[in-house]
């Protein structure tokens, strides 16, 4: 996952170029939402955006590059929702309650995002678990570290990278399962099991 949002093949500098890149991404996301990832091609994107196919290749390697840019942007949106939830939560509570609030915020943000679930499925089909799981130094890893420190949990400096890598991996996999659940009750059950695991591991 990129840490800076959209990273295009050729960085647009002029307002017109920036608007074209944004149009390509917006049209691609709309196609994804309405017709699914199988309907996306550089030809269909160009037709929807009413631009030449060659214009797409000025800024992107192809459709997979576009979808990955969208995935990175969507993931950043969800992480921002978690950051807001952390800022708003009452930290004078047990670690299990704090982490539960943060994880539920992740799930709710993922459910409300128009394309996150579709993009997550697509990314998981294209990359290995290792490639799709953010590392300890990712924004998700740093957010988890911030949550731990805010709740008073102790992280030995000698084990910090290993602990954060393990935690990020567990959270990423389990949240993916929860996101696939349409019923909030079933998703909540998965999240609560995740809370139990993290509380025993980190609390």
Image (cartoon, rainbow, N blue to C red):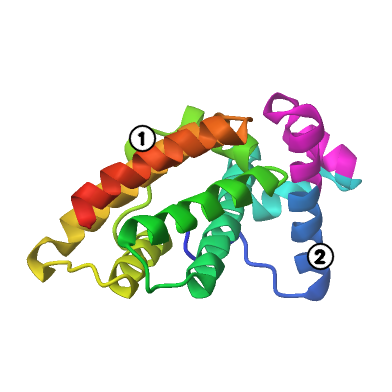
Task: Point out the stretch of residues depicted in magenta.
Answer: 27-48
CA separation, marks 1 and 2? Answer: 34 Å
143 sits to left or right of 25: left
Which percent across, then down, holds residue 180? 56, 30
The magenta stretch spans residue 46: yes
In front: 186, or 138?
186
Q: Secondary structure at mark 2?
A: helix
26 sits to left or right of 113: right
Q: Residues within 10 Å of mark 1 (few under 14, many from 20)?
A: some
The answer to whether one can see residue 7 in this image is no
In the rendered image, which quarter is residue 149 located in? bottom left
Q: Residue furthest top?
A: 38
**Residue 112: image tag:** none
193 sits to left or right of 176: left
The magenta stretch spans residue 199: no
Q: Secondary structure at mark 1?
A: helix
Mark 1 lies on residue: 129
In front: 159, or 51?
159
Secondary structure, magenta segment, majority class: helix
Which percent across, then down, holds residue 202? 22, 56
Q: Residue furthest left?
A: 158
Q: Is residue 1 above or below residue 124?
A: below
Which percent across, then down, holds residue 197? 27, 42
Mark 2 lies on residue: 19
């Amino acid at each position: 996952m990129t840490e800076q949002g959209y990273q295009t093949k050729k960085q647009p500098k002029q307002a017109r170029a920036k608007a074209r890149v944004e149009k390509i991404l917006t049209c691609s996301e709309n196609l994804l939402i309405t017709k699914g990832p199988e309907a996306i091609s550089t030809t269909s994107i160009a037709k929807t955006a009413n631009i030449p196919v060659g214009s797409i290749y000025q800024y992107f390697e192809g459709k997979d590059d576009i979808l990955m840019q969208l995935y990175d942007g969507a993931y950043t949106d969800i992480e921002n929702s978690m950051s807001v939830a952390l800022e708003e939560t009452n930290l004078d509570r047990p670690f299990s309650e704090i982490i539960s609030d943060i994880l539920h915020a992740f799930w709710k943000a993922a459910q409300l995002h128009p394309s996150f679930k579709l993009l997550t499925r697509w990314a998981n089909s294209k990359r290995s678990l290792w490639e799709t799981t953010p590392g300890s130094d990712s924004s998700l890893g740093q957010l988890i570290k911030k949550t731990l420190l805010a709740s008073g949990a102790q992280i030995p400096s000698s084990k910090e990278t290993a602990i954060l890598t393990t935690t990020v991996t567990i959270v990423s996999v389990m949240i993916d399962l929860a996101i696939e659940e349409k019923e909030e009750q079933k998703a909540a059950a998965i999240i609560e099991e995740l809370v139990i695991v993290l509380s025993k591991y980190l609390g």
